[in-house]
Amino acid sequence: MRIAVAGGTGVVGSHVVEAVRANGHDAVVLSRGSGVDLITGSGLDAALAGVDAVVDTANVSTLKADAAVRFFETATGNLITAAERAGVRHVVLLSIVGVDRMPYDYYAGKIAQERVVEASPVPWTILRATQFHEFAAQLFAQAKVGPLHVAPRARVQPVAAREVGARLAALAAGPAQGRAADFAGPREERLDDMVKAYARHIGHGGWIPSVSLPGPQMKGMRSGLALPGPGALLGTQTFTESLAALG
């Protein structure tokens, strides 16, 4: 089986590629480095020749709703159009648990992306996953007030990106499911505790205050809207175990 992975060099996409190959299938990486531009559509037709399934993990770094909507509608729209031309039989999209309950900022783009996939002429599967363990490191680097690192408060149930990648690879190799069961980590965590634990792990000794960030998305995450429902599938690696694996 030949499976293409949009965003195949990213945090999750690289794990999808690894899992696809470990399962004995051929993986095609769709990235600018491989000559594919999802925004213009350049290189897509050639890259999707002979492909059976596509996994879309492409991402954009923005917190602005308009920018996120434009990116995801354009990129995923071009991907699906090219997939239909190529005779691809299955498109799998990675989305986020709770986007429908918090359709703001970046999440507004993910909701728009889901709608593009749901209207696809190509059979589709959407997998919503919770935040990754790597989210703590990203926030440590980005959430700052001047020189001071801060730890945003939120209720999360983080999952290993490697396990999400393996789940996406397995879904791509099977029949389309529509909305698949959500995928989450094994237990709930406090996001601010995660950021502080990551900071300690890398040797940061400074004070990191817990803060409640403004905005409806972060308010929703503090109230538990990013947590999975009772029907979710759970991964196995805890956040503490992921830190230990960093060495």
Image (cartoon, helix red, strand yellow):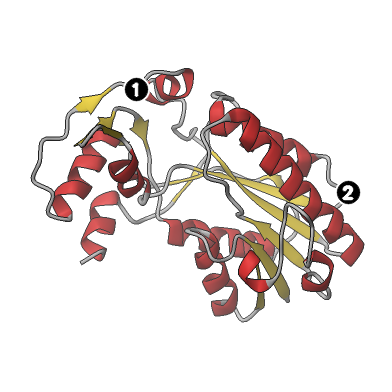
Q: Is residue 123 in sight in this rendering?
A: no
Secondary structure under the numbered disc 2 in the rendered image: loop
Q: With 242 as the anchor, is 76 left or right in this view?
A: right
Q: Quadrant of residue 214?
A: top left
The tally of labels here is 2
Toward the viewer: 41 or 21? 41
Q: With 128 as the anchor, is 26 left or right in this view?
A: right
Secondary structure under the numbered disc 1 in the rendered image: loop
- To which residue does mark 1 refer? 213
Mark 2 nearby-residue class (10 Å; few <14, some 14–19, many ≥20)? some
The kind of residue tagged 2 is: Pro
The kind of residue tagged 1 is: Leu
Q: Which residue is at a point 59% across and 72% down the rendered structure image?
A: 20
The vertical placement of 50 against 222, above or below, is: below
Q: Which residue is at a point 31% across and 36% down the rendered structure image?
A: 143
- Disc ID at residue 121: 2
Furthest-front residue in view? 146
Percent across and percent down for residue 23 are 58, 77
Mark 1 nearby-residue class (10 Å; few <14, some 14–19, many ≥20)? some
Toward the viewer: 193 or 35? 35
Split into 4 quadrants, where in the image is the N terminus? bottom right
Percent across and percent down for residue 134 are 36, 51
The answer to whether marks 2 and 1 mark residues whose Cβ atoms lie closer than 8 Å is no
Toward the viewer: 79 or 97? 79
- Disc ID at residue 116: none
